[in-house]
Image: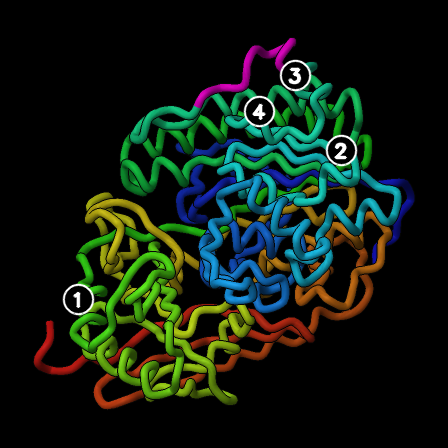
């Protein structure tokens, strides 16, 4: 894919939940420094649902959720003798499920597997949840690849490497109480990479994943002083990495990627989701149980699994939902465009048509209003607290994510206006390493940001889909770049006159 005068390596630095519009000289001078040094992906998008563990799985597989199968932070798996609720924050459960499926928890190969098959190495250092850390390389134990957590020493895949790190830096930090920025773990992992992992093993690919500012945005608010403190702190940690990269890494063929998994919007009103479903005759619960008609997965993205997923029941539930002012885009199984319930889109349009997918998938309605911090993006929510940050839906500020690249082969001071996705990083990394991308990847190599890359940038084609029922009308936007198709955003533009 690229001219390779040497053996290149790649470091991916992730900022959980960082909105691109919060990158500015006064708050994130080091990320701004990288912007000037490298290439910025100005139209970068995540996947839907815009949740961390879904997005991270797309990052390391280069594939959309309908292919890799992690369809939600939590989802119902009906392929067990009895339907089972899967919480992907549980690292041990992820490993157990992968073993029980004979190594096929994911429907496609991950970056760790591909690198191992080609004699290359992947190291993961992450302060996200235990499950998110595990999903970044769920077969790390099998391949003897390093995983370190900023909070959970029990999930380290090398006891010896954990011992080396803790002997130098002290014990792995404890999780701080809610509302307190998670700072210690970010500094711990940065030092672990700079002082131990890189000097001792020089992995071909390393992922350093900061769990902030996501946790502070949820607990304090997206633009709250404590969240800004967390953003400033992780930017300083990134500055340590950037100093190393400029002094040593770039000369050693290291390409640097900085990215986020999703953005945030702010809750401005509470939705009566359960009451609406119960008024439609559905008894609701958070997990399968006797007498439960609708399993409603908690979270900002709506996932409803029905005990009787008939067309009649799905239509009845969706019909009740789209009458409510909080109901945003809705997706069900369906045909080319329309879902089986009037007013819904077919869920394949959001790359969510998988055996694990919910019978009804929806987002809460959002708008372009300003929150209490002057940031664009407000949303209804059934779980989030009013005034605090949430994500999972299809608002532009949830789908927009950070994307930057720098390195020996990358154009400097370049802004790419070509649409791109979190699914594009894995094929780009493989291209840098001279490894062929598997056909399972839906993403593309980001050729437009590389120096002397031959050929024209593929043509961009945008398409808007529409569907409606009564006063409820929704739009969904796709963007095609060559063979890659990205979900841009979706929204609802109609509302019954008797509701406000």
**Residue 29, magenta (yes or no):** no
**Residue 168, magenta (yes or no):** yes
Looking at the image, residue 442 sits to the left or right of residue 498; the answer is right
Which is nearer the N-term, disc 4 or disc 3? 4
Please provide percent x and percent y for residue 496: 15, 82
| Residue under label 4 | 153
Q: What colour scheme has been applied to the protein in the rendered image?
A: rainbow
| Residue under label 3 | 165
**Helix, strand or loop at mark 2:** helix
CA distance for labels 3 and 1 = 51 Å
**Helix, strand or loop at mark 1:** helix
CA distance for labels 2 and 3 = 24 Å
Please provide percent x and percent y for residue 388: 26, 45
**Quadrant the C terminus occupies:** bottom left
Q: Residue at x 25, y 57 (%)?
A: 381
Which is nearer the N-term, disc 2 or disc 3? 3
User: 263 or 74, which is in the foreground?
Assistant: 74
**Helix, strand or loop at mark 4:** helix
User: 16 or 346, which is in the foreground?
Assistant: 346
Q: Residues within 10 Å of mark 4 (few under 14, many from 20)?
A: many
**Helix, strand or loop at mark 3:** helix
Residues at badges 3 and 1 in contact (C-beta under 8 Å)? no
Which region of the structure is painted magenta? 166-174
Q: Can you tell which of label 4 and label 3 is closer to the viewer? A: 4
**Quadrant the N terminus occupies:** bottom right
């Amino acid at each position: 894919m690229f001219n390779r005068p040497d053996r290149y390596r790649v470091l991916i630095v992730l900022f959980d939940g960082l909105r691109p519009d919060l990158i500015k000289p006064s708050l994130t001078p080091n990320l701004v420094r990288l912007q000037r040094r490298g290439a910025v992906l100005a139209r970068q998008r995540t996947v839907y649902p815009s949740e961390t563990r879904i997005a991270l799985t797309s990052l390391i597989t280069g594939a959309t959720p309908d292919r890799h199968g992690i369809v939600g932070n939590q989802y119902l798996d009906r392929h067990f003798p009895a339907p089972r609720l899967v919480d992907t924050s549980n690292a041990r459960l992820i490993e157990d499920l992968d073993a029980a499926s004979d190594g096929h928890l994911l429907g496609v190969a991950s970056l760790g597997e591909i690198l191992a098959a080609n004699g290359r190495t992947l190291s993961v250092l992450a302060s996200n949840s235990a499950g998110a850390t595990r999903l970044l390389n769920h077969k790390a134990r099998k391949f003897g690849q390093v995983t370190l957590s900023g909070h959970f020493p029990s999930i380290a895949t090398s006891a010896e490497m954990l011992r080396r790190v803790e002997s130098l830096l002290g014990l792995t930090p404890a999780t701080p109480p809610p509302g307190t920025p998670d700072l210690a773990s970010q500094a711990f992992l940065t030092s672990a990479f700079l002082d131990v992992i890189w000097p001792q093993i020089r992995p071909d690919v390393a992922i350093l994943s900061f769990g902030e500012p996501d946790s502070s945005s949820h607990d304090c608010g997206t633009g709250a002083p404590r969240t800004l403190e967390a953003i400033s702190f992780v930017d300083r940690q990134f500055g340590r990495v950037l100093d190393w990269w400029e002094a040593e890494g770039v000369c050693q063929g290291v390409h640097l990627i900085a990215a986020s998994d999703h953005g945030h919007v702010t809750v401005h009103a509470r939705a009566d989701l359960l009451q609406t479903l119960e008024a439609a005759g559905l008894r609701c619960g958070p997990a399968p149980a006797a007498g439960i008609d609708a399993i409603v997965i908690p979270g900002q993205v709506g996932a409803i699994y029905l005990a009787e997923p008939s067309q009649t029941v799905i239509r009845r539930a969706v019909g009740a939902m789209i009458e409510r002012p909080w109901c945003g885009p809705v997706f069900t199984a369906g045909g080319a465009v329309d879902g089986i319930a009037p007013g819904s889109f077919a869920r394949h349009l959001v790359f969510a048509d998988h055996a694990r997918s919910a019978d009804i998938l929806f987002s809460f309605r959002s708008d372009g209003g300003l929150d209490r911090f002057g940031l664009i993006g407000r949303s209804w929510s059934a779980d989030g607290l009013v005034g605090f940050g949430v994500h999972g839906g299809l608002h532009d500020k949830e789908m927009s994510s950070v994307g930057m690249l720098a390195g020996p082969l990358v154009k400097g001071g370049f802004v790419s206006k070509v649409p791109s996705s979190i699914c594009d990083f894995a094929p780009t990394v493989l291209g840098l390493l001279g490894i062929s991308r598997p056909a399972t990847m839906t993403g593309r190599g980001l050729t437009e940001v590389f120096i002397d890359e031959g050929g024209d940038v593929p043509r961009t084609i945008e398409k808007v889909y529409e569907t409606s029922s009564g006063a409820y009308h929704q739009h969904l936007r796709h963007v095609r770049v060559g063979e890659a198709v990205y979900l841009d955003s979706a929204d609802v533009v109609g509302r019954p006159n008797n509701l406000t």
